[in-house]
């Protein structure tokens, strides 16, 4: 029995918590935490840059003897010789599509269609990416704990299921052992669970690793779809979070722009990596990550109805989407195919929301309603 409980507890930690974005809707009590989160991420980016440049004696020796004497001469470059991006690099979506990925003056950086090559061998791309992965992805629990413990970071907290949107649902042991609810934070006026920031930093990296194989956004996004339809979602906690899918996709853009973007966060200069600009979460956050606007789906009709019923008792006392106008903005923000994939059907056609159930079956191998064509407007 103890083993069974331990497995469930560990499984929940892997899958992450659910969030309740309904209860605090309309509240003005949670202050904007965008700047505090930016500081944490920028500190970790700088840490990765420093660790990548400050090699151990052994690492320096291995690097030196890996080049011939003639090749070693070429490692010394003029001070004006900077590692620049490949002139042939292209990015998506097309710049002419001015509305896409634009929110209140903040812009989701475009995706590169190829990785950047460095002219100086001392700029070890693989080493830098490993340091970034360790500091940003694997150390997420550290960032999360700081955001929860730091009194300067305002947040809303629901204790387990009591008082939450999930209070009237019997969601099984996974939910009872801590699956609800993550603290809610205000990021530039958008209320989201802290788990969304996790998805940007962690699952975003998973998307990026897949994306670099063939530069297919479809292939990368399918990872999240399989997880939400499977053990991380409908077949696990019973919740398919479209908000998580939105955060995952924003995370792909984050990781793809750390060193490979048009305006990368880190560049190579004179044989060393250098932080080139600061990260700002405002460029990545959208109301698609708010689960009271971009609805979640549930694995039974009974739970779906209870969620709808509870939504009418808390916050704005409305069923999802609580603000249909925001759904229209999301339609402009995303490309047609992204919109179909990332946004719940209720938010796709909010005028028909009352006739669309929040219930979806789990354990689907693929979502046949997701079209592969037209990922980006040309």
Image: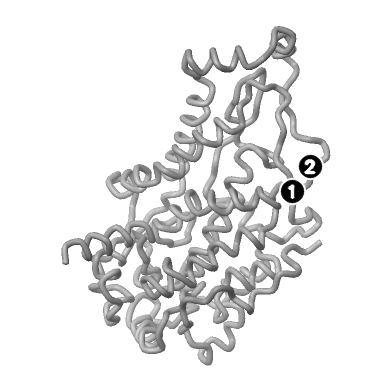
Q: Is residue 55 left or right of residue 164?
A: right
SS at mark 1? Answer: loop
Whether the residues at callouts 2 and 1 have beta carbons within 8 Å, the answer is yes
**One can see residue 287 in this view:** no
Q: Is residue 124 left or right of residue 203?
A: right
Residue lying furthest left in this view?
A: 2
How dense is the environment of label 2, judged by Cα within 10 Å: few (below 14), some, or many (20 and up)?
some
Relative depth, front residue between 265 and 270: 270
**Mark 2 — residue?**
89
**Mark 1 — residue?**
113
Q: Report the colour scheme.
A: one colour
Relative depth, front residue between 149 and 217: 217
How dense is the environment of label 1, judged by Cα within 10 Å: few (below 14), some, or many (20 and up)?
some
Relative depth, front residue between 258 and 64: 64
Q: For the point 51% across and 37% down, which residue is it?
A: 132
SS at mark 2? Answer: loop
Q: For the point 51% across and 36% down, which residue is it?
A: 130
Q: Is residue 193 left or right of residue 59?
A: left
**One can see residue 118 in this view:** yes
Q: For the point 47% across and 77% down, which residue is it?
A: 322
For the N terminus, the quadrant is bottom left
Q: Is residue 262 above or below residue 301?
A: above
Q: Residue 169: x, y in percent?
A: 29, 81
Q: For the point 39% across and 88% down, which residue is it?
A: 305
Please tell me how many numbered marks the rendered image carries: 2
Return the disc, 2 or 1, that comes first in the chain's sequence: 2
Q: Residue 238: x, y in percent?
A: 39, 75
Q: Residue 205: x, y in percent?
A: 53, 49
Query: Which quarter of the figure has residue 155?
Result: bottom left
């Amino acid at each position: 029995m103890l083993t069974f409980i331990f497995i469930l507890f560990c499984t929940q930690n892997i899958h992450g918590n659910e969030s309740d974005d309904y209860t605090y809707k309309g509240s003005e009590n949670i202050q904007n935490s965008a700047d505090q989160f930016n500081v944490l991420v920028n500190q970790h980016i700088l840490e990765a840059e420093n660790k990548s440049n400050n090699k151990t004696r052994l690492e320096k020796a291995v690097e030196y003897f890996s080049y011939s004497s003639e090749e070693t001469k070429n490692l010394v470059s003029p001070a004006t010789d900077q590692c620049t991006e490949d002139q042939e690099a292209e990015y998506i979506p097309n710049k002419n599509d001015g509305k896409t990925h634009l929110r209140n003056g903040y812009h989701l950086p475009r995706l590169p269609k190829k990785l950047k090559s460095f002219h100086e061998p001392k700029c070890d791309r693989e080493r830098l990416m490993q340091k970034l992965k360790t500091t940003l992805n694997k150390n997420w629990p550290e960032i999360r704990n700081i955001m929860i413990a730091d009194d300067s970071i305002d947040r809303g907290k629901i204790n387990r299921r009591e008082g939450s949107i999930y209070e009237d649902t019997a969601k099984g042991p996974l939910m009872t052992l801590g699956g609800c609810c993550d603290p809610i934070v205000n990021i530039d006026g958008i209320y989201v669970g802290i788990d969304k920031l996790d998805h940007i930093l962690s699952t975003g990296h998973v998307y990026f690793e897949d994306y670099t194989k063939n530069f297919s956004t479809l292939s990368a996004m399918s990872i999240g779809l399989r997880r939400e339809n499977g053990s991380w979602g409908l077949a696990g906690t019973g919740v398919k979070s479209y908000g998580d899918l939105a955060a995952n996709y924003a995370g792909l853009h984050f990781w793809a722009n750390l060193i490979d973007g048009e305006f990368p966060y880190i560049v190579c200069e004179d044989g060393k990596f250098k932080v080139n600009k600061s990260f700002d979460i405002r460029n990545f956050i959208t109301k698609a990550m708010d689960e009271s606007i971009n609805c979640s789906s549930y694995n039974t009709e009974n739970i779906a109805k209870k969620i709808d019923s509870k939504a009418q008792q808390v916050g704005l006392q409305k069923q999802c989407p609580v603000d249909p106008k925001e759904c229209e903005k999301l339609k402009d923000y995303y490309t047609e195919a992204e919109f179909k994939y990332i946004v719940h059907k209720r938010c796709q056609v909010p005028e028909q929301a009352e006739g669309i159930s929040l219930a979806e079956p789990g354990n689907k191998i693929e979502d046949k309603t997701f079209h592969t064509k037209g990922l980006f407007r040309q």
